[in-house]
Image (cartoon, rainbow, N blue to C red):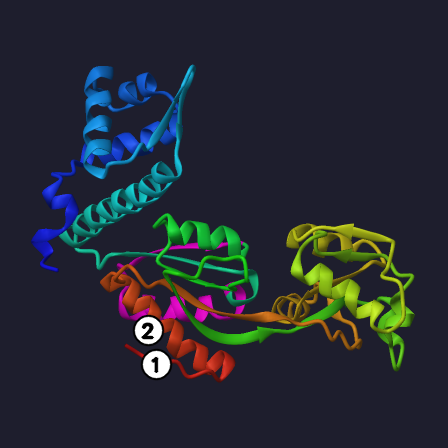
Amino acid sequence: MSTYNHWFIRARLKTRQLLLLVALAEEGNIHRAAQVLSMTQPAASKLLKDLEDVLEVSLFERLPRGMRPTWYGETMIRHARMALGSLNQAHEELNALKSGHFGQVGIGAITSPGLSLLPAAVTLVKQEHPSLRISLDIETSPVLLDRLEQGKLDIVVGRLFAEHDKTHLRYESLTEELICAIARPGHPLLGMTGLSLRDVLTAGWIVPPAGSVLRHRFDLMFQQEGLAPPINTIETSALLFITRMLQQSDMVAVLAADVAHYYASHGIVSVLPLAVPCHMDAFGIITRSDRLLSPAAKVMMKALKQTSLTQYGRRLELE
């Protein structure tokens, strides 16, 4: 299909219609949405009606005290946010180029690669392009994937689970995430030889929250040995709390090996000589297959792939 035959060209889709869709989703009321966009309510109503007429669907249910998106509306709102986000990004990139900057890239990672992979990759980028602006988020995979979908991130280093919609995602696996047990330096368990799960059963444990993948596998690890999972537990994934709590108690914690060894190298914790056979699923580099990477994002992608060879022995194809 020719670029000039797209439906939105024929429909004369207006940017203000996209803005109105997003405002209606956020405000739930056409009067307030019109105020946000500095237009009259009749003008906003006409913009919405024109769009619904072209699409031949109802985008919002008219309720006594507001408006609620239909399934059609939810779809258009999602794409409106993406389109507006892309236009904002284009404007920011142009301004950056005009002011002598190379551009900007948003990257998100789960904790382990955020600690082991990203610092080296960012260093590599900054050596070659000091003016390239980099924003970095360290979060869980679901949060990062939401931000990737919204256009707030260009690249994610995280996991894909069964519940994630992979229709428009590109995934390149990096490595599995190993797990280990940690405690404070000088902890009595550190001097034990042949440490087993039975030896740590009565210890106080800091564990991931219930419902998380790692928590499930942690509990399953004990059950497979014919043991009930520990009952003296604190549930959290907050690293600052975990390390502080370990320092002032005899509790032990389960943590990603890369993160544990980082803290151990600084003398904050010690890794217990305990086999912990509950690794996490592999993580990898995730991008949107329905969007082109900006020049800045391509530079970051190249650095990530080069660094992954050193960090994980994983050679990925360089575009």
Residue on which the image places disc 2:
302
Residue at disc 1, secondary structure: loop
Looking at the image, can residue 183 be seen?
no
What number is the disc on residue 317?
A: 1
Upstream in the sequence, badge 2 or badge 1? 2
Residue 128, magenta (yes or no): yes
Estimate the x, y position of residue 215 in percent, counting from the top left: 72, 59
Amino acid type, callout 1 = Glu
Callout count: 2
Which residue is painted at 89% across and 71% down in the image? 226
Q: Residues within 10 Å of mark 2 (few under 14, many from 20)?
A: some
Left or right: residue 9 compared with residue 193: left
Residue 133, magenta (yes or no): yes
Estimate the x, y position of residue 150 in percent, counting from the top left: 37, 48
Amino acid type, callout 2 = Lys
Estimate the x, y position of residue 288 in percent, counting from the top left: 35, 61
- As rendered, which of 48 and 24 lies closer to the eye? 48
